[in-house]
Amino acid sequence: MTIGGGFGAKFGGVVDVYAVLLSQATGHPVKIAYTREEDFLDGRPAPGLIMTIKTGVRKDGKILARQAFAYWDVGVQGNGSWASARVKSVYDIPHIDVHGYDVATNKPPTGAYRAPGGPQASFASEAQLNKIAHALSIDPVDFRLRNMREGREVDFKQTLRKAAEKADWWNRTNGPNEGWGVAIGEWTNGNGPSSAVCTLQDDGSVKVFSGLMDITGTDTAMAQIAAEVVGASYDRVSVSRGDTNSAPMAVASGGSQVTFSMGNAVRRAAAEVRERVLEVAADLLEARPDDLDLRDNKVSVRGAPDRAVTLGDVAKAAAKGKGGPISGKGSFAHEPSATTIAAQIVKVEVDPDTGKVWLRRIVQSLDCGKAINPMAVEGQMEGGAVQGVGWGLWEQMAYGPDGRNLNPGFLDYHLATSADLPAIETVLVEVPTDNGPFGAKGVGEPPITPGIAAVQNAIFDAVGVDLHEVPFTPERVRAALREKANRN
């Protein structure tokens, strides 16, 4: 049965390790279930971050240098300092100096949380860039476009422009206490060992077999890839899964690597099936494989569509021939992908009396390389956006002076709900990467990275307060407004 994915935070083993050890010691099945409080304490939350950044910029808006010091709160175990370099992001910065430190504290161990370290580092980086753009009287979108480097297999500028055009950024208007914010984030998907088997059944259907878990519509994507390569219709492809004791090796469910890695393995397995189909069909049709068309569940001679055989005919003929039933296997490991950029623009309204912030609009774009399943890509983008703005406005694990978690449950830990959110508008940009299946890049993690900074910038645009600590609760917004009033 499908039990879900490991994701980054669970890659090293959490509660499952205790169950295995106890089962080995007792010789009996062991089940361990956490209470919600235990899950908060041992579920590997993301590390906290305190970062200071200094950036050198010419009056014309060209970034020349950047220095950053990052201190990551990793609890009793964990790491975050490696993500400090995210402050360079997708910008052309000639001189950069980054220092990252992991600080052990008396808090729960930390782990990878959707683009580990990305939202924290992007918040610090992008919030400061918005401050610089304001100080130089340069539009924050234009300021970013001036400084984005040219990417390989990715178009940073186009992705930001698409979001800005969707939001009608250059014609935006503000009502009372309304403001707009913009930010970008970047990530590069992981890549891991994957393998799959693809077979042509005697009824002409196609079966894909692997050890992959179907947690975000990955079965759909694998079936689509196999169908495209083999020349079968999607409804004629089935995907079956097995456990680690029976199925071909599958990549772990995390790191935005599933479609990238397993998609490549499935594509290669399906390509072997396609090659065999064309060989067998060439004998049946008395033609050369190069002269055949394979699509819509049949093989036909190019220029003579009446000379055709179905995939079922080919499968039956192969089973009776010396080649045997048609099957293919594909493997993949550690071929690099390209950077993926996510851009977000949000509009907020702030109540200056209470400090409450309402989200009025969320517009985002993502360079996904190639959207294998556009609806699933949009779903990942929407989920990431919700988590990003959630970090900005609501989510926080609070601790007392003794290190005790003060809100270990969803009564006091606020997660965004549909009542907190406007409709989310998405734009897909497709600049293929060389090594991805049909050019696809990983899309699971990048959408979370820009949200905090975009909300922070929008609050500043609305009421003129510059917040540096998340979440931007009504109490913090109201306190900043009082401080601003006292200064004036």
Image (cartoon, rainbow, N blue to C red):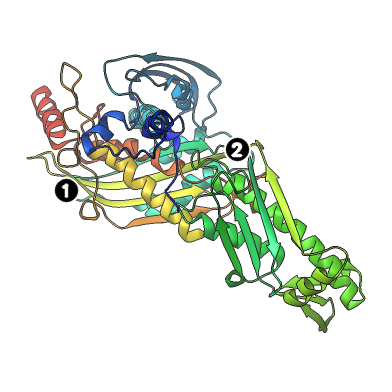
Q: Is residue 110 left or right of residue 290?
A: left
Say which of marks 2 and 1 sits in front: 2
Which callout, 2 or 1, points at the residue further toward the start of the chain? 1
Quadrant of residue 87 within the rendered picture: top left
Q: At x 69% / y 73%, what residue is drawn?
A: 204
Q: CA distance from mark 2 to mark 1?
A: 50 Å
In this view, the residue farthest toward the bottom is: 306
Q: Position of residue 39 (x, y in %)?
A: 28, 35
Find numbered disc 2 in the image and state the secondary structure of the residue it sits on.
loop
Q: Position of residue 35 (x, y in %)?
A: 23, 38
Q: At x 58% / y 65%, what residue is drawn?
A: 238
- Mark 1 neighbour class, 10 Å CA radius: few under 14, some 14 to 19, many 20 or more: few
Quadrant of residue 185 within the rendered picture: top left
Find numbered disc 1 in the image and state the secondary structure of the residue it sits on.
loop
**Circle 2 residue:** 192
- Mark 2 neighbour class, 10 Å CA radius: few under 14, some 14 to 19, many 20 or more: some
Q: Is residue 295 left or right of residue 208?
A: right
Q: Is residue 464 in sight in this rendering?
A: yes
Q: Is residue 300 left or right of residue 43?
A: right
- Give the vertical position of 18 relative to 267 (above or below): above
Q: Tag 1: residue type? A: Pro
Q: Position of residue 17 (x, y in %)?
A: 41, 30
- Give the vertical position of 465 relative to 313 (above or below): above
Q: Nearer the viewer, residue 382 or 94?
A: 382
- Give the vertical position of 92 relative to 451 (above or below): above
Locate the C terminus by quadrant: top left
**Circle 1 residue:** 176
Q: Is residue 372 in sight in this rendering?
A: no
Q: Which mark is residue 137?
A: none
Q: Position of residue 336 (x, y in %)?
A: 64, 36
Q: Tag 2: residue type? A: Gly
